[in-house]
Every structure is written in structure tokens, then in C-alpha cells.
Image (spheres, rainbow, N blue to C red):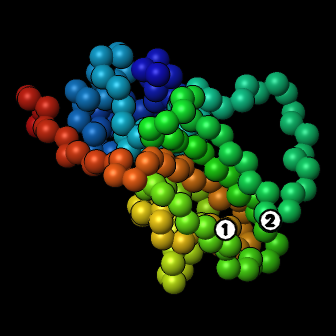
Amino acid sequence: MGPRLRTARERHGATLTGVSRATGISLSTLSRIETGRRKPTLEVLLQLAKAYGVSLDELAGTAPAATGPRAPAPPRSGNDKAVLPLTRYVGGLHAHKHVLPAVDAPPARPRQVSHDGYEWLCVLYGRLWLALGEQDLVLSAGDVAEFDTRTAHGVANAGPGGPVEYLIMFGPQGERLRPRTPTPDRGAR
């Protein structure tokens, strides 16, 4: 991953110092990530993708290779959804990228389901309608939601304006994500 991040930064014409100032990520952390001595967190990858003007798929190396001009995508109904698994094992924490196609008109309230587990989602692009119990939330790029999946929930594209891309991490009940506050690197100012 480090070499891909360095290439993305260089293509963007940015220095490590400039990226550090723009993102708030310490210079030493960025350097260690690019040299492979440290693994980036999802939060760091999202910040770098935004700073470099590239998709998370490009940074992670999961974007399809360009093979020349692409044919237009076939039209899809508003209920179609593309799901890209980001984890390959069964059990434990699962991660997926979801893409909801663009819609021509405001959708009906999403159908809700409930099941055991805990979910975290982050909108990468577009506007996502999250129906969570009796609440209706519209999340935009960069917004995050975390909830117990025993609460009835459903999602939809929030309306005309393009597709919606979002990440989901889901785990068994009690296996919540635990945010950690990074400790400042020694010597970084």
C-alpha cells in the first residue's frame, strides 16, 4: 500500500509536509506509511483519498484496471445495489463497499430489516437515506453512522443527483468498533 500512496501523492504534486499540513496527519506517520513501516487506518486512507482527489479503491489497489474507453453502464432500477466484499473470511468483522445507483425521483422510505449484530457505515460519495427505527437520517460524504442492527434499519439513495457509495463494517453483537485516539509521535511538532 505504501508505494501506491506515494505514487498518488506524487501524481497530485504534493509533498509529505504539504499533505501533513492539509490533513493534520503527522509527517512521521505519513512517511512510515509510505515506507511500509506502518499500516494506515481507514480514517487515514479516507483523508488521503480526499487530499489526493482519488477514490479509496485506487488507493487500496482494488479499482478495476483501465482497459480503454468504457461502455456506458446498463440502466439499473433504483433497487439494484452493487456490493464489493472487502474481507475474505467468514465470521468476525465483515467489511463491504456498497454502491446504490442514481435515481430519477425521490425514493419511497427504505424497507427495514433487523438482525443480531452491530454496524458502522461511512458515506464516501452522494447522499444516503438511513431509516433507523422511526428516525430518517440523510448522510452525506464523510458522515458516519453506528448502530445496533437489532434496531430496524434500511438504506436508499436520498434522491436525484447521482449514485451513492458507502462502506459498511458489520460484526456480531458486542463486537463494536473501538475508536482509538492516536498518541502524538515523539519528536513531531
Residue 128 appears in view: yes
Q: Depth check: 7 or 133 in front?
A: 133
Residue shown at the point (42%, 20%) measured from the top left:
2
Q: Residue at x 37, y 21 (%)?
A: 34
User: Which sits in the foreground, 2 or 80?
Assistant: 80
Say how many tags the image has: 2
Residue occupying image coordinates x 14% and y 32%: 185
**For the residues bearing labels 2 and 1, Cβ distance under 8 angstroms:** yes
The correct choice, above or below, for 122 with respect to 140 in the image is above
Question: Which residue is located at x 42 percent, y 32 percent?
Answer: 14
Q: Name, please, the residue furthest toward the bottom.
A: 134
Q: Is residue 141 left or right of residue 78?
A: left
| Secondary element at image label 2 | loop
Point out residue 80 in the picture as x, y percentages from the top left corner. 79, 57
Give the side of residue 97 with respect to residue 38, left or right: right
| Cα gap from disc 2 to disc 1, whole angstroms | 8 Å
Residue at which label 2 appears: 78
Instruction: Tell me the tag on residue 156.
Output: 1
Q: Is residue 54 visible?
A: no
Which corner quadrant of the image does residue 33 belong to? top left
Q: Position of residue 40 (x, y in %)?
A: 36, 31
Query: Which residue is more in the foreground, 22 or 25?
Result: 25
Q: Is residue 29 above or below residue 123?
A: above
Q: Element at badge 1? A: strand
| Residue 13 horizontal side relative to residue 78, left or right | left
Pinpoint residue 54: horizontal percent, then vertical percent. 57, 40
Place of residue 150 in the rendered image (x, y in percent of width and height, measured from the top left): 47, 66
> Quick check: 171 above or below 103?
above
Q: Quadrant of the C terminus?
A: top left
Q: Amino acid at mark 2?
A: Gly
Residue type, label 1: Ala
Badge 1 density bin: few <14, some 14–19, many ≥20, Cα 10 Å: many
